[in-house]
């Protein structure tokens, strides 16, 4: 069994992270989200989410994480992105279950509005925003 730098078996840690295929990538995907006509935006105190739902046979939700440069230096922005990724990873089931039941694809982006945020606050706000998106999904798509 291979061990990584932390002296832990690498096979046990590989399944814990957010899979690469569920992270939103590509210029056109981000442009679609920031087009004023196609995306819906929800605000919370520290985080906002923009999302785009579309009918597709492709399964899975893709999400991106943005912390604007004007908020601070790279180390603090990267920390906030890690917090958002972990909060989403722990609560992604809120959206993925609904998306699969409606045969809907979800592309979204979580945007931080501040870098002064702790994990409890980030997780609470991400959960609230994901529940709002789930409610939108239930009201606009029928099984």
Image (cartoon, helix red, strand yellow):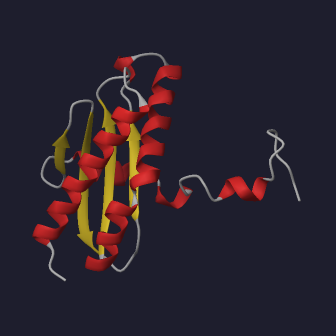
Which residue extends farthest front? Answer: 120
- Residue 63: percent from left, percent from top: 39, 52
Q: Residue at x 42, y 44 (%)?
A: 87
Q: Is residue 49 visible?
A: yes
53 horizontally vs 142: left or right: right
- Residue 55: percent from left, percent from top: 25, 75
Indicate the quadrant where residue 49 lies: top left
49 horizontally vs 138: left or right: right
Q: Residue at x 10, y 68 (%)?
A: 139
Q: Nearer the viewer, residue 102 or 39?
A: 102
Q: Residue at x 14, y 46 (%)?
A: 36
- Residue 120: percent from left, percent from top: 39, 35
The C terminus appears in which quarter of the rendering? bottom left
Indicate whether 69 appears above or below 5.
Answer: above
Q: Is residue 25 visible?
A: no
The N terminus appears in which quarter of the rendering? bottom right
Indicate whether 136 appears above or below 74.
Answer: below
Indicate whether 29 appears above or below 77.
Answer: below
14 horizontally vs 111: left or right: right
54 horizontally vs 58: left or right: left
């Amino acid at each position: 069994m291979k061990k990584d730098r932390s002296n832990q078996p690498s096979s046990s840690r590989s399944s814990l992270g957010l899979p690469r295929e569920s992270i939103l990538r590509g210029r056109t995907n981000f442009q679609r989200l920031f087009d004023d006509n196609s995306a819906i935006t929800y605000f919370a105190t520290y985080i906002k989410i923009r999302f785009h739902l579309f009918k597709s046979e492709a399964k899975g939700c893709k999400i991106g994480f943005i912390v604007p440069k004007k908020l601070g230096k790279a180390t603090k922005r990267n920390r906030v992105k890690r917090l958002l990724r972990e909060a989403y990873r722990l609560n992604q089931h809120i959206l993925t279950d609904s998306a699969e039941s409606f045969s809907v694809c979800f592309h979204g982006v979580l945007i931080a509005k501040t870098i002064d945020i702790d994990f409890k606050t980030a997780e609470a706000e991400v959960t609230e925003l994901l529940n709002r998106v789930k409610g939108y999904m239930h009201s606009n798509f029928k099984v």
